[in-house]
Image (tube, rainbow, N blue to C red):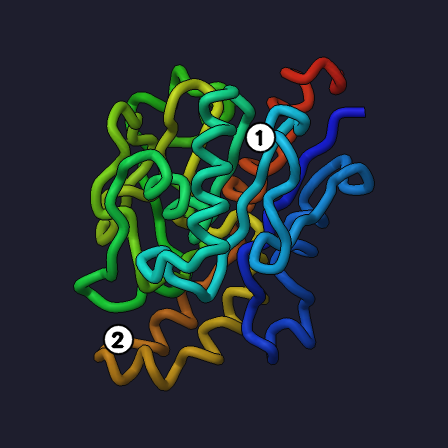
Amino acid sequence: MAKIVILKTGSTHPTIQQTFGDFEQWFLERLENHQSAVVVDVTQQEPPGSPDQWAGIIVTGSPAMVTAREPWSERAAAWLRTAVEQEVPILGVCYGHQLLAHALGGEVGFRTQGRESGTFEIVCTDDVRQDPIWANAPSSFPVHLTHAQSVLRLPPGAVLLAHSRDEPHQAFRVGTNAWGVQFHPEFTDRVMTAYLETQAASLAEEGQDVEQLFRSVRPAPEAVNLIRRFERYALDRAGKYSD
């Protein structure tokens, strides 16, 4: 049976984890075939075999920074390069989005504006209309974000799929099967609020309007649907999924 592998690249804040669980659990809750998914913590383990043994790959977020180029992260980046060469479907989220861009020759670095955290609107480009998993997305929709680093330059040949007022590279695709999204489609609005609660003091020190950030938090169902569309695409492509 074809399976999705979730590459765990770190853990959420301990106080958030106590209440809501960790990154991989949030993805598993979003997958329709969650019982067949496999989680591999690449901060503690080697990447899982040859990428082409998997129907699809999801790469989680992380409190780590891609620019630190930790050994485990660079090993995962090399593995993702092989996965792209083998045309295995990939969905990189936040750190995973940045790691995928880094692996393929893009540039990652700190945001000059400071951390972006909260619920914000992203705008799709015209290229989504021909995209296998973005084609039915509305022209704009809310997403949950929390990140200090960004993709500053897309990998060669990448197709920009979405941007926002303060973030030019909210989503991209390389080839036909590899996607990166800066936002967190696995977050609920309650998880987003919990993040703001843990970050409130540091966001205020940066001069951000924390109360407005709290007021702006709202559900992001279209972002959630992206995970399911990716799953269906990956399993359908592997010949193991049918509606």
Tell me where residue 233 appears, x and y as whole percent: 60, 22
Type of amino acid under label 2: Gln
Q: Which residue occupies the foreground of this view, 14 or 19?
A: 14
Type of amino acid under label 1: Phe
How would you rate the neighbour count of disc 1 (Cα within 10 Å): few for under 14, some for 14-19, many for 20 or more? Answer: many
Q: Secondary structure at mark 2?
A: loop
Tell me where residue 54 appears, x and y as whole percent: 66, 29
Q: Which mark is residue 230?
A: 1
Tell me where residue 8 appears, x and y as whole percent: 59, 53
Q: Which residue occupies the foreground of this view, 82 or 231?
A: 82
Name the residue that disc number 2 marks.
Answer: 208
Give the number of marks: 2
Q: Secondary structure at mark 1?
A: helix
* Residue visible at 21% across and 41% down in the picture: 153
* Residue visible at 63% across and 34% down in the picture: 228
* Residue visible at 24% across and 28% down in the picture: 156
Q: Which residue occupies the foreground of this view, 26 or 109?
A: 109
Label 2 and label 1: CA atoms lie apart by: 34 Å
Identify the image quadrant of the C terminus. Answer: top right
Tell me where residue 71 appears, x and y as whole percent: 45, 56
How would you rate the neighbour count of disc 2 (Cα within 10 Å): few for under 14, some for 14-19, many for 20 or more? Answer: some
Residue 243 visible? The answer is: no
User: Is 87 situated left or right of 149 in this image?
Assistant: right
